[in-house]
Image (cartoon, helix red, strand yellow):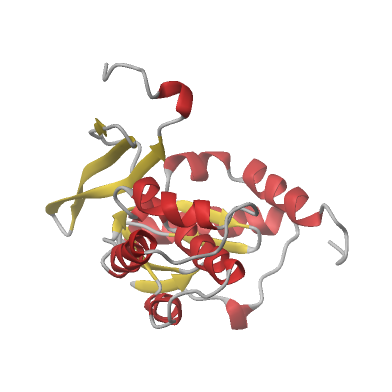
């Protein structure tokens, strides 16, 4: 596909999603534009899955650059994540760049921080609550001032990023649990799952979900 075509990325992504519907729904393949990640529980299944992907790539007459390919890694960095076995973590190099920065002095710097944090929001418990006061600070009508409350939220957000747990790559063939909670400020949920890794059961979160209460919802009952 030639460069400089406005809709090329979305067209390419749609084409890839169309070519690999089963693989994507089975949860062992991740495709983001030209980044393709396949992962497996065992070496035998991994070889079979690679064969499925490579055959499809050949059929659509696509080519790989071998210099950019990584095969058979137990750990891999991609799209700001560390893929380790059946779980995803935050790339610590990218995280350090943000954690070591001083308190943002402008709205632009704060927006940059919140954009980074928002990318990993599903790793952070109570993200919406922590994010709330900092997000309001970026409003055009709000004077930029790091009050004590906002500094506290800023530090809490950085700590949450630094301590963010690895999340499990979901296996939709296995049962999952859903825990939900609500309060006067927002709604929250966590979706954990128990998977088998090296013949041992491991339980961990697939994602955390949270959002703020809307003004029209403030009078709603808990149920």
Question: Where in the figure is residue 83, as x and y percent of width and height?
Answer: 38, 66
Query: Residue at 35% across / 47% down in the picture?
Result: 129
Residue 212: image quadrant is top left
Horizontally, residue 3 falls left or right of residue 85, namely right
Query: Residue at 35% across / 62% down in the picture?
Result: 157
Question: Where in the figure is residue 173, as x and y percent of width and height?
Answer: 32, 35
Question: Where in the figure is residue 50, as x and y percent of width and height?
Answer: 49, 60
Horizontally, residue 60 falls left or right of residue 223, namely right
Residue 179: image quadrant is top left
- Quick check: can you spot residue 176? yes
Identify which residue, 16 or 78, lies in the foreground. Answer: 78
Question: Where in the figure is residue 99, as x and y percent of width and height?
Answer: 38, 77
Horizontally, residue 72 falls left or right of residue 16, namely left
Identify which residue, 28 or 104, lies in the foreground. Answer: 104
Horizontally, residue 181 falls left or right of residue 57, namely left
Where is 51 relative to 221, above or below? below
Where is 1 relative to 192, above or below? below
Q: How many marks?
A: 0
Quadrant of the image containing the C terminus: top left
């Amino acid at each position: 596909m030639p460069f400089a075509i406005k809709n090329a990325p979305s067209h390419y992504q749609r084409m890839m999603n169309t070519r690999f519907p089963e693989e994507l729904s089975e949860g062992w393949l991740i495709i983001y534009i030209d980044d393709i990640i396949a992962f497996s529980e065992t070496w035998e299944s991994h070889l079979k899955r690679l064969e499925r992907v490579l055959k499809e790539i050949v059929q659509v007459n696509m080519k790989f650059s071998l210099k950019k390919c990584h095969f058979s890694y137990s750990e891999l960095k991609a799209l700001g994540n560390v893929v380790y076995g059946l779980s995803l973590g935050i790339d610590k190099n990218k995280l350090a760049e943000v954690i070591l920065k001083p308190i943002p002095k402008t709205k632009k710097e704060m927006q940059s921080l919140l954009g980074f944090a928002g990318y990993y929001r599903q790793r952070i418990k109570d993200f919406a609550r922590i994010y709330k006061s900092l997000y309001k600070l970026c409003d055009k009508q709000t004077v930029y001032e790091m009050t004590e409350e906002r500094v506290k939220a800023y530090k809490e957000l950085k700590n949450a990023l630094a301590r963010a747990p690895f999340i499990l790559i979901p296996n939709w063939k296995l049962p999952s649990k859903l825990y939900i909670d609500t309060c006067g400020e927002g709604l929250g949920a966590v979706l954990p799952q128990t998977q088998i890794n090296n013949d041992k059961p491991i339980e961990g979160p697939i994602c955390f979900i949270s959002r703020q209460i809307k003004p029209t919802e403030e009078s709603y009952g808990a149920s």
